[in-house]
Image (cartoon, rainbow, N blue to C red):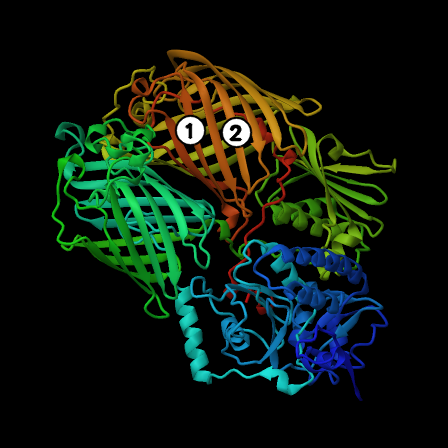
């Protein structure tokens, strides 16, 4: 068999005639004639590989391309859009005259191949994983090239460079081999592997990323460092390269440049790049990302959670920090002051003083080649101000060193190295209120002290000394410790602090240090990537396999319902069958990862549905109404589950319909049969309840563990009874003696009495009805014992158009305070309370917001604002604040109600699917102002299937190490 030659034409770069230069310099393709011929009949890729095994014996499977003619049309459109984008680069000063024209010629020369990325070209693996084994259709082609010897580099001037492949070489090594004296160096490079995987790699001293292993035939596109505003264009060009397969070698062997380093030298360079990339952000003594006492401008990954404990006498910090956005870090802290009593011994015994604070850090801009990363932050934003501080800090990385330098006001800059630069704007910036005068005034945002007073110089360096788990830190402390809270002063031998961080586990850091020149420090920090949590469902039932064949036996709908319930945890309400449609109804079903459950239910329906059925439909009901339906063409859905898509942009075969249209038309076939299943009217769920109080004078942590049971009973006409009982098992609330003063009706500060009066309690017992009032209008009425402290009657109205990002509701309640025993008796206090609430899904970065205005339990009037960030895996981070017509003095310590809430779906971390979500609330203080009643019904929750994002949450991808090789990022 003779080989045919396919030559792709590129812009000439060798200074000779076009045709000769193209033949000498351009990457080429040498392909076996037989495998490149169009497929004659439908067959799996694994079968095709077996049939062509002999012809492919000396080929390069990593560069294999599945070519689909239908894809070429969309790819040609993609190329035209790319040409328009790249042409705009002429306006960028980063490019020299002619550079952009050469890039345009490169793009025009690269064909629309019709490539659809597929898994590894390994017939046995594909046969064992049929859902990854493409079904080839007549006209498709498979191209498997010979193994190339080089890596192709597309420089920013539009010229090609080919470098001999070396196993240990990094992207930076290849770029260095191609760099010319007059050529622009790159900060970032796009690496395209022959199989189409795409990576963005930092290749400068300030942004080195973990080194990639480049395969022979890889492409590297290196835009100029100065062109940092065309990120989307750079990525689009790299994606176009990913459609080309392996880069191939130039026909003239002399055009392949060697790497002038030995294997040992390359391995040393690779180790150095890995060391530089390992200089990661770590927690400071205060919990925020920093050195020891001082902050840096660095941030954790979005969605990260950090819990750390740090001890340096006399302070012990317990820090909790969240990273809701890439450029925002927020957290709270408890600081134990060992040599100061919490209060009089009669009040708090021998407990030492505890201070609470909330911190915030905001990135102002990101690091680039010449500009440092810059951040501004505030310590003790809404606390007592004892440790209040503000700072402006810059960070710049150079190889394995990460430097920081900044200015600090307040506690962190108390040494006062210089006058306040803001003093020129106003004299008020020259003096700062004494923090000790703020005792007992915690909770108010301290605008009056922000960025006031003298400034201390802060800075330091974090160094990765070797490719391993150790980081070293050195910093200039901006505090001289002569004017500490509570009138204390501590000796400082020198202002340089030294520290060491040892990474025990990717989620655990241990650190030791030497601070003030005379004190040892010790700490531990835990980091959990909440937004990237995922878990294999090893305890779930084995999924029902999806096969293309359809059953011939008569269906047994009771068996179908039982298997659906076992697979999804949702109990079907009814099944309806007509000639061509099978419909399954669920009532009261919900899960954060609902889409996964839909596919599991569809698998059972396909297994059991008669062969004549062409449409599968699942209807999700709430309040006796169909709120969402998921409809799919049976054949399309089976194809999506049993073979890879034939396009890079596959359409979801499941069509979602929300609102009134979700109910759909009645079955066209009058012979349609509906089978209803018995659902238990009574449901009982045993649980274990944990109640905690943190930071009080009676003990830093008070807790109560109770056995509990929650029950619900469905009644006719949409009515429902619910109840919740508790039996206290063990606790330490006998130490809870201090109620604290209150200038308002005690609507929440009788917490001690409610927690300790009775061992067995009726937490709630209610009767409610919820239904649709009209198009997009819903109502609820309810009565009974709402929660542990209040009972009464109330109602809610909600306007929520299906799929809308806006909703509006009003609730009104007449409630009375319950007896401390939490039985059926009430106390005398009663009040009318209710709110009007606007709900808004901003559509930006997963942020949802709500504003509620109305009357609270203490009779005060005001508004509550809630901001919530939701990640793709359903984890949420939220903050809330309430301001009412009660003054800060009348409200008492804390000044106004506020808090932080973190929600984590159990599905994100458990090995078994669950519909539950763990919710963690931190509220600095429980006071009587701005307190809402807990209502037994929430119509926003009852109408969740109308939310445009209801089915958008999925488990995060598993870490690379737990994935098959073809699914890994690297």
Disc number for residue 364: none
Q: Position of residue 446 (x, y in %)?
A: 31, 30
The residue at 13%/45% (across/down) is 490
User: Relative to residue 55, is residue 283 depicted above or below?
Assistant: above
Q: Secondary structure at mark 1?
A: strand
Q: Quadrant of the C terminus?
A: bottom right
Q: Secondary structure at mark 2?
A: strand
The residue at 16%/44% (across/down) is 481
Quadrant of residue 238 within the rendered picture = bottom right
Whether residue 113 sits left or right of residue 182 in the image: it is right
Residue labelled with disc 2: 850
Q: Is residue 641 visible?
A: no
Q: Decide which of 862, 938 is in the foreground and name it.
A: 862
User: Relative to residue 274, is residue 490 depicted above or below?
Assistant: above
Q: CA distance from mark 1 to mark 2?
A: 11 Å
Residue labelled with disc 1: 881
Whether residue 101 sits left or right of residue 853 in the image: it is right
**Given the current orientation, which residue lies at the most extreme bottom position?**
1
Q: Position of residue 409 (x, y in %)?
A: 27, 40
Q: Decide which of 641, 892 is in the foreground and name it.
A: 892
How busy is the neighbourhood of tag 1: few (under 14 within 10 Å), some, or many (20 plus)? Answer: some
């Amino acid at each position: 068999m003779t080989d045919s030659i396919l030559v792709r034409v590129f812009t000439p770069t060798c200074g000779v005639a076009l045709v000769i230069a193209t033949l000498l310099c351009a990457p080429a393709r040498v392909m076996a004639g037989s495998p490149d011929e169009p497929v004659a009949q439908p067959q799996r890729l694994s079968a095709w590989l077996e049939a062509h095994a002999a012809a492919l014996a000396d080929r390069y499977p990593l560069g294999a391309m599945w070519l689909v003619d239908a894809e070429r049309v969309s790819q040609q459109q993609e190329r035209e859009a790319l040409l328009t984008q790249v042409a705009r680069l002429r306006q960028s000063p980063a490019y020299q005259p002619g550079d952009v024209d050469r890039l345009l010629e490169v793009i025009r020369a690269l064909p629309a191949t019709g490539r659809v990325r597929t898994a590894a070209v390994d017939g046995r693996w594909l046969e064992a994983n049929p859902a990854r084994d493409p079904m080839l259709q007549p006209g498709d082609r498979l191209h498997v090239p010979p193994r190339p010897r080089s890596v192709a580099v597309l420089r920013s001037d539009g010229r090609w460079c080919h470098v001999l492949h070396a196993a240990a070489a990094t992207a930076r090594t290849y770029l260095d081999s191609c760099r010319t004296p007059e050529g622009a160096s790159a900060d970032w490079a796009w690496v395209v592997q022959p199989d189409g995987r795409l990576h963005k790699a930092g290749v400068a001293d300030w942004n080195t990323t973990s080194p990639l292993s480049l395969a022979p035939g890889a492409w590297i596109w290196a835009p100029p460092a100065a062109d940092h505003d065309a990120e989307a264009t750079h990525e689009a060009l790299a994606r176009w390269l990913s459609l080309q397969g392996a880069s191939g070698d130039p026909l003239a062997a002399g055009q392949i440049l060697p790497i002038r380093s030995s294997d040992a030298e390359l391995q040393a360079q690779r180790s150095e790049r890995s060391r530089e990339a390992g200089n990661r952000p770590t927690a400071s003594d205060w919990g925020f990302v920093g050195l020891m006492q001082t902050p840096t401008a660095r941030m954790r990954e979005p969605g990260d959670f950090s819990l750390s404990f740090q001890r340096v006498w006399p302070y012990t910090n317990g820090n909790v920090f969240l990273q809701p956005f890439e450029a925002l870090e927020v957290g709270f802290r408890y600081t134990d002051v060992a040599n100061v009593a919490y209060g009089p011994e009669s009040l708090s015994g021998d407990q030492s003083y505890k201070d609470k604070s909330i911190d915030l850090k905001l990135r102002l801009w990101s690091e680039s080649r010449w500009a440092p990363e810059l951040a501004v932050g505030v310590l003790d934003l809404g606390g007592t101000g004892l440790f209040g501080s503000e700072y402006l800090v810059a960070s710049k990385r150079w190889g394995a060193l990460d430097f920081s330098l900044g200015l600090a006001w307040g506690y962190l800059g108390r040494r006062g190295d210089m006058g306040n630069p803001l003093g020129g704007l106003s004299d008020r910036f020259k003096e700062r209120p004494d923090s000790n005068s703020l005792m007992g005034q915690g909770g108010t945002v301290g605008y009056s002290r922000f960025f006031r007073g003298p400034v201390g110089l802060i800075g330091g360096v974090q160094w990765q000394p070797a490719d391993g788990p150790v980081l070293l830190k050195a910093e200039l402390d901006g505090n001289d410790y002569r004017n500490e809270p509570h009138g204390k002063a501590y000796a400082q031998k020198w202002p340089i602090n030294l520290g060491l961080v040892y990474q025990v586990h990717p989620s655990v850091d241990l650190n030791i240090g030497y601070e003030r020149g005379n004190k040892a420090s010790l700490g531990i920090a835990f980091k959990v990537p909440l937004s990237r949590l995922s878990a294999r469902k090893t305890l779930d039932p084995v999924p029902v396999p999806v096969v293309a064949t359809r059953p011939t036996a008569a269906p047994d709908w009771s068996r179908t319902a039982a298997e659906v319930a076992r697979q999804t945890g949702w109990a079907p309400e009814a099944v309806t069958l007509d000639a061509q449609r099978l419909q399954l109804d669920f009532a009261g079903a919900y899960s954060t990862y609902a889409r996964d459950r839909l596919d599991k239910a569809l698998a059972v329906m396909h297994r059991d549905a008669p062969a004549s059925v062409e449409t599968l439909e699942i209807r999700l009901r709430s309040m006796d109404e169909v709120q969402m339906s998921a409809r799919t063409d049976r054949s399309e859905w089976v194809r999506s589950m049993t073979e890879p898509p034939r396009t890079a942009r596959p359409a979801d075969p499941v069509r979602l319909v929300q609102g009134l249209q979700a109910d759909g038309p009645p079955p066209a076939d009058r012979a349609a049969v509906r089978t209803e299943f018995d659902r238990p009217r009574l449901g009982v769920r045993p649980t274990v309840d944990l109640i905690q109080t943190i930071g009080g004078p009676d003990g830093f942590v008070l807790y109560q563990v109770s056995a509990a049971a929650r029950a619900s009973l469905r009644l006719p006409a949409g009515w429902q009874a619910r109840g919740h009982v508790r039996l206290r098992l063990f606790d330490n609330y006998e130490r809870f003696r201090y109620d604290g003063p209150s200038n308002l009706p005690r609507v929440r500060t009788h917490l001690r009495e409610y927690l300790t009066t009775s061992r067995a309690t009726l937490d709630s017992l209610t009767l409610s009805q919820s239904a649709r009032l009209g198009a997009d209008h819903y109502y609820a009425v309810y009565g009974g014992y709402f929660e542990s402290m209040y009972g009464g009657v109330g109602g809610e109205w909600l306007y929520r158009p299906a799929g809308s990002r806006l909703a509006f509701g009003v609730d009104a309640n007449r409630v009375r305070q319950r007896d401390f025993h939490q039985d059926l008796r009430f106390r005398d206090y009663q009040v009318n309370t209710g709110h009007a609430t606007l709900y808004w899904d901003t559509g930006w970065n997963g942020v949802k917001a709500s504003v509620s205005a109305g009357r609270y339990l203490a009779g005060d009037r005001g508004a509550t604002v809630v901001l919530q960030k939701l990640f793709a895996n359903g984890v949420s981070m939220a903050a809330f604040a309430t301001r009412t017509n009660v003054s800060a003095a009348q409200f008492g310590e804390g000044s106004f109600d506020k808090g932080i809430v973190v929600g984590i779906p159990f599905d994100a971390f458990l090995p078994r699917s669950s519909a539950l979500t763990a919710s963690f609330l931190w509220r600095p203080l429980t006071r009587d102002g701005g307190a809402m009643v807990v209502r037994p019904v929430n119509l926003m929750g009852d109408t969740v299937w109308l939310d445009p994002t209801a089915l958008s949450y999925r488990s995060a991808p598993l870490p690379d190490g737990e994935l098959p090789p073809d699914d890994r990022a690297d």
